[in-house]
Amino acid sequence: APPRGRSSFFSACLSAFPPSCHMTSVASQRHEFKHEGRVIYTWEQDLSEVQIDIPLPPGATKRDLAVTITNDQLTVGLKGVPPYLNAPFPSKVKASESYWTVDDGTLSLQVCKSVKAEFWPSALRGHELEAGSQTAEREALMRHRFQEEHPGFDFSGAKFEGEVPEAKSFMGGMSRP
């Protein structure tokens, strides 16, 4: 059974968030999704993975959680109550290589992208970043790609003129290790 009194924490947002929810950028390529002023989750991506961190209600442990990662969907909630999050990913994932952990009151999910270097406009479909944040995220992915391909160089200050190319397909694309 779920911990007493904690189902109300997850009942605020079940499977779909109203338009009042929005995604904003936080610090260095870390983004947060909020509902009614409360952070629902934070996330970031690199070439191969998307990390999603969800704050848990006080006292909740991994034994209290029901977490399912499929190739196209994430479901998170407390056992015995409707899911807190139940949304599709913006693209396919490798569910068998994805995992989750709980530490210091946070559920952390490491989701493995099916297509290396593919840009994700959000961690979950329907929670897209604003246009300016999407451009910054595309630039960050290109810098990650350049850094991986040329580890002896520093691309942290690289700027792009005009439209940012797609990291997964730029100049023939990337090979997946």
Image: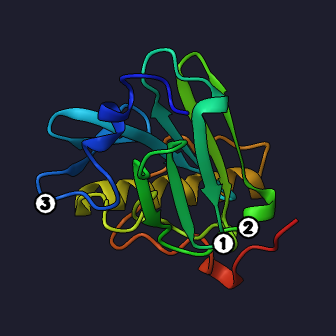
Side (left or right) of 71 relative to 175: left
Q: Residue furthest front?
A: 1
Q: Residue at x 43, y 35 (%)?
A: 28
Disc 1 marks which residue? 71
Q: Is 26 located above or below residue 113 in the figure?
A: above
Instruction: Identify which amino acid the numbered label 1 is placed on.
Output: Asn
Q: Spatial distance from mark 1 to mark 3, Cα to Cα?
A: 26 Å
Quarter of the image where one finds residue 30: top left
Disc 2 marks which residue? 94
Using the image, tell me which numbered label, if any, was put on residue 19.
3
Instruction: Identify which amino acid the numbered label 2 is placed on.
Output: Lys
Instruction: Identify which amino acid the numbered label 3 is placed on.
Output: Pro
Residue placed most toward the observer, 41 or 5: 5
Q: Is residue 136 visible?
A: yes
Using the image, tell me which numbered label, if any, was put on residue 34.
none
Side (left or right) of 63 relative to 129: right
Q: Residues within 10 Å of mark 3 (few under 14, many from 20)?
A: few
Q: Residue at x 42, y 69 (%)?
A: 164
Q: In the rendering, at what x and y percent does residue 70 appear?
A: 65, 67
Q: Spatial distance from mark 2 to mark 3, Cα to Cα?
A: 29 Å
Q: Residue furthest right?
A: 177
Q: Is residue 30 visible?
A: no
Q: Is 65 located above or below residue 132 in the figure?
A: above
Residue placed most toward the observer, 146 or 38: 38
Asked whether the beta carbons under mark 1 and mark 3 sit within 8 Å of each other, the answer is no
Task: Give SS at disc 3.
Answer: loop
